[in-house]
Image (tube, rainbow, N blue to C red):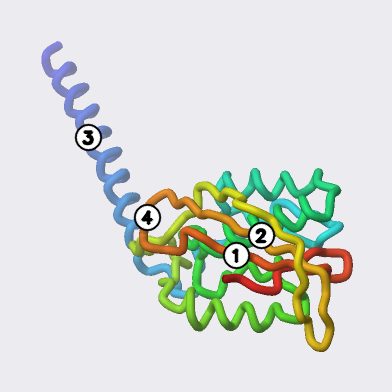
């Protein structure tokens, strides 16, 4: 009787040992596979999750909840001044919220810029503002980057702006910027916007 019990215990110990060995082996294989993954296997990617068809503005899935909420507000606005003010707000939030950008080339604020000046804006931001941003394609960035948590409108002024050889009507929107953590970035901004086909777009940031 004792022999049977002993055999049963030995059998259970054997099964348990095999299970443990399988778990250890599986863990080792997973870690090895992760470390040996191809360098072109991108881990961190984005996809479009929303769009305002009337403006052509899109929203990616990696943005902050604050930016998403402000993006949704634009959908219901009808007054030209209100639209201009909200576009200025979205532009500033997206430009200065760098922490969710995968790399320095993700300059999504470009969509709010005047159509004929978008390439200029993209290059200016890339050369002078995002040039230090470390790549986060493998979700391993340790760099501390800013995130905007609130933007307040200080005032909106009707003005004019010289666009080429023409003087066109414009809105000059003054804003204050608050961050999740103060890393020394701009806390005030002045955004100038003009009509741009069906949109009201940014032409200047000061």
Residue drawn at point x = 84 percent, y = 83 percent = 166
Q: Which residue carries the number 4 mark?
A: 182
Q: Is residue 34 visible?
A: no
Q: Marks 2 and 3: in contact by CB < 8 Å?
A: no
**Above-or-below relation of 115 to 85:** below
Image quarter of the N terminus: top left
Label 4 Cα crowd, 10 Å radius (few <14 / some 14-19 / many 20+): few
Question: Is 53 on the left or on the right of 178, as rendered?
Answer: right
Q: CA distance from mark 2 to mark 4?
A: 23 Å
Q: Secondary structure at mark 3?
A: helix
- Please, which residue is most extreme toward the left here? 2
Q: Marks 1 and 3: in contact by CB < 8 Å?
A: no
- Please, which residue is most extreme toward the bottom here? 165
Tell me the tag on residue 14. 3
First in sequence, mark 2 or 4: give its number.
2
Q: Which residue carries the number 2 mark?
A: 173
Residue 5 x %, y %: 17, 16
Q: Nearer the viewer, residue 34 or 80?
A: 80
**Above-or-below relation of 129 to 155:** below
Q: Which residue carries the number 1 mark?
A: 190
- Please, which residue is most extreme toward the top here? 1
């Amino acid at each position: 009787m004792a022999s049977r019990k002993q055999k049963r215990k030995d059998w259970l110990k054997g099964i348990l040992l095999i299970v443990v060995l399988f778990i250890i082996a599986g863990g080792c294989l997973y870690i090895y596979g992760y470390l040996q993954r191809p360098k072109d296997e991108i881990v961190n990617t984005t996809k479009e999750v929303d769009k305002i068809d009337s403006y052509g503005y899109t929203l990616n899935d990696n943005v902050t909840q604050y930016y998403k909420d402000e993006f949704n507000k634009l959908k219901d606005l009808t007054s030209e001044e209100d639209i201009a003010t909200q576009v200025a707000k979205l532009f500033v939030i997206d430009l200065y919220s760098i922490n969710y950008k995968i790399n320095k080339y993700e300059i999504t604020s470009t969509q709010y810029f005047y159509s004929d000046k978008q390439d200029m804006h993209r290059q200016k931001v890339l050369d002078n503002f995002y040039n230090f941003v470390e790549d986060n394609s493998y979700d391993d960035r340790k760099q501390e980057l800013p995130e905007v948590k609130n933007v307040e409108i200080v005032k909106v002024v009707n003005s004019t702006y010289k666009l080429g050889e023409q003087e066109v009507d414009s809105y000059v929107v003054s804003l204050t910027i608050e961050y999740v953590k103060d890393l020394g970035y701009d806390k005030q901004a002045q955004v100038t916007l003009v009509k741009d086909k069906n949109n009201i777009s940014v032409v200047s940031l000061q």
